[in-house]
Image (cartoon, helix red, strand yellow):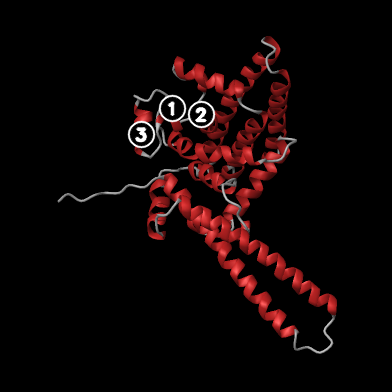
Amino acid sequence: MSEIITTYNEKDLFVYLQKDRLLTAKKISGENMENTAKVKEEKKTVKGFFKNVGNFFKRSANSYEEKDEAVEKALKEFETKHPEVIDLATAEGLVESLFKDDQYGLTKLVFASSIILDDEYEYKYVDEGLKGVSVLLYGDDKTLLLIKKQLYDNFNAISPKSLSNVQKGILIGVAASAAIGVLGMPLILAPTTAAAAGLAAHGFTAGAITLESILFSAAITGIVYGGMKLYNNEKVKQEFKNLSPEKNALYLALQCTYIERIKNTVSEDEFKEQLDSILKNLATLKSDLDYYLFVEKESTKENKEKIKSFHEFDNRLSKVLGV
């Protein structure tokens, strides 16, 4: 009887980390409920204890109860969607295998950003949950929170708008395909190509490979999409044309975060090479925006916003690099 081999992918790791965050919230919520109940009981025995302090504990208990209900609801929703989830040992093995060739940490950054921006469930005690994820991904409980701060700071500097739920959700489906692009897999859309076959092997069908993810992969890895094969090039250009200003700003913020994270961790020559590649690609994207706005006069309001975000990216990058 032949042995059945089960393979896991980025999606399995992502789901495991969702559960880990929800369980962390449940643990903290339970501890808060228990501690509040104990303190409240102790204060009953203190003669003449001030009424306003008693009301304070009552409000605290009510707040914890509300959070606990939200935590239980989110966890139940998760368990309905995912009755089977990989265990810790498998998750640790996936972290090792998925990111072993991630020379500059870009693949992991994209994946980590997907976790940070994930709002599929109502997460409580967000930072505490991210600390646990950080330990698994980076070996400490601080890195993911630092990435979160960098990403949000960069986005806020580039875009006048805040990250809405719609904007947050876009990276989740992009992470794996972007990661594969970083590892050198050809970025082609046709389902018969090696790229599609490779993505399918990782659990992603051709339908899940959005043009947006192709653009994102190309942009952040420094692959100049003008050099892609013609049919791929035109599809990506069309997608870029339709990209919302908010998504455009988020991609720029993530690229700025990547640059910020590697500037002091790689050699000067390597950093120059990475930066040059990204900036050349951004120049290509920006020139297309100029064409759509000034020559074709298409979507003038949106394209003006997108062009402004490129200018703000330059300003933000200047600050990040200390120029």
Separation (CA) of disc 1 from disc 2: 8 Å
Q: Which residue is at the front of the view, 6 or 306? A: 6
Q: Which mark is residue 187?
A: 1
Q: Secondary structure at mark 2?
A: helix
Q: Amino acid at mark 3?
A: Gly
Q: Residues within 10 Å of mark 2 (few under 14, many from 20)?
A: many
Q: Which mark is residue 218?
A: 2
User: Which percent across, then down, holds residue 267?
Assistant: 53, 42
Q: Is residue 76 above or below residue 274?
A: below
Which of the marked residues, 1 or 2, is nearer the chain's N terminus? 1
User: Which percent across, then down, holds residue 203?
Assistant: 38, 39
Quadrant where the C terminus is found in the figure? top right
Label 1 close to label 2 by CB (< 8 Å) = yes
Q: Residues within 10 Å of mark 1 (few under 14, many from 20)?
A: many
User: Which percent across, then down, holds residue 278?
Assistant: 56, 30
Report the residue marked by disc 3.
Answer: 198
Q: Which mark is residue 17?
A: none
User: Which percent across, then down, holds residue 293?
Assistant: 69, 15
Separation (CA) of disc 2 from disc 3: 17 Å
